[in-house]
Image (spheres, helix red, strand yellow):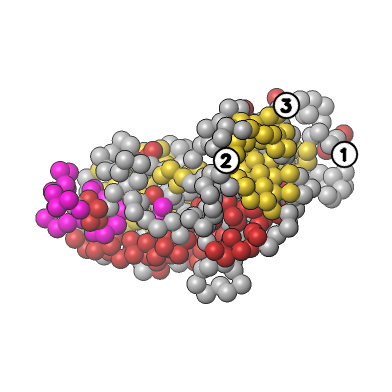
Amino acid sequence: MFDYDSRPVTAQVILVGARSSAAAYAIRDFLTRNGRPYDWIDVDQRAGMDQLLGPGEIDASRLPLCILPDGTRLAAATVDQVAAGLGMISTPKLGEYDLVIIGAGPAGMAAALYAASEGLSTVVVEAMAPGGQAGTTSMIENYLGFPEGISGGELATRAAVQARKFGAEILLARRLDRVVPDAGAHVGELSDGSLVRGRALLVATGVEWRRLDAPGLDALLGAGVYYGAGPSEAQACRGAGVVVVGGGNSAGQACVRFSRYARRVTLLVRGPTLAASMSQYLIDRIAAVDNIEVRTRTRVVGVEGDGRLRAVVVESGGGGEQSSLAADALFVCIGGRPRTEATEDCPVLRDDAGYLMTGTDLTASGGVIPTWPLTRPPFPLETNLPGLFAAGDVRHGSTKRCATAIGEGAMAVALVHRHLAEAGGP
């Protein structure tokens, strides 16, 4: 902490709030994932409050309070307000792009890099931060060319810098609300009301964590219960009891990260073993950490708390026997569902789970796609709407790996070139 008295206008953000505040957690996660330094002050630890805050600013209705580098104070701050105050929100520069990419995960950033470097006017729309779920991973150790591993955050930052270097625009803190086909192009309506029009559009929105069906969880969201395992909370778990739910690589990575700070990390897995869903190198890593405990055949059936998580109620062995596990934080990493809400108003085909159908999956039965207007079949990553592509985890049949998503993003650009050539473009 620096001396607030001698430095009323700081070089970085100051965020004041309660650790149990979901709104404060959202802002911390946003700033951390976008590489924006900030000082966090827990309002329950009141040392220095009188020098920093004015009369009435500790009122719960005014929290979280965000103080920007220029001294602007945002009471009851939201992510959108903070992003705007930091100058992170910009308007699209062009009226029409060769390629609009929705989502800045590995697939979207790879597509942005290759499209921009090959001369296509390119814009990426991202609701949170570059990197997607991969951006929250503490260490990717099985990615080609990085024998010592690379953190998801570093990979995302490098990708964003590289894509911008070649001229790609990246619009942050924007959600895509709707996609509308329009005269051979596709128009995206963004959450701030602005429009982006693309002669081709790539959906690379990935997946979001599935919700855990257990009583009491929703009331404690951001107050000890979290979906995913964002890097903003790791150091805050110093000396804490942490529970992680899930059997995949994301859950394994979270356990390894939290074990560096937490007193104890407990991994809860519904199945009989980790081997079915987790890479062997992570299984070995977890087994070598003394303060990680793995409980198989165990599921969460409830939580206990008083405005803040205090314990997780679990059922083990399938016999109905329940027990209470003391916990300061619960991180749920149990797989995902595709982020395809923005395409619900256009006639794009999905599978039963909501993933976008592409390429040969559209014609796997040998039939004709009812809405397909061209004589050629869809390209491999093309949906049933010509010029609308999908890549990465949001696509039906995709392999849920960072390297695969990057490969699909690069492949999508080659297919976009073919589509634009058909339409009379570059």
Q: Residue at x 62, y 36 (%)?
A: 314
The answer to which of 51 and 315 lies nearer the viewer is 315
Amino acid type of the residue tagged 1 in the rendering: Gly
Q: Which residues are magenta?
A: 364-393
Task: Say above or below: 360 vs 44.
Answer: below
Q: Which residue is mark 1?
A: 48
Q: Residue at x 87, y 48 (%)?
A: 3
Q: Secondary structure at mark 1?
A: loop
Circles 3 and 1 in contact, beta carbons < 8 Å:
no
Task: Say above or below: 128 vs 18.
Answer: below
Q: Which residue is mark 3?
A: 306
Foreground tag (3 vs 1) = 3
**Residue 380 x %, y %:** 26, 59
Task: Say above or below: 45 vs 376.
Answer: above
Predominant SS along the magenta part: loop
Q: Secondary structure at mark 2?
A: loop
Circle 2 Cα neighbour tier, 10 Å, few/some/many (<14 / 14–19 / ≥20) = some
The answer to which of 97 and 58 lies nearer the viewer is 58
Which numbered disc flags the more N-terminal residue, 2 or 3? 3
Q: CA separation, marks 2 and 3?
A: 28 Å
Amino acid type of the residue tagged 2 in the rendering: Gly
- On residue 92, which mark appears? none
Q: Is residue 151 visible?
A: no
Foreground tag (2 vs 3) = 2
Amino acid type of the residue tagged 3 in the rendering: Asp
- On residue 317, which mark appears? 2
* Residue 391 in the figure: left or right of residue 163: left
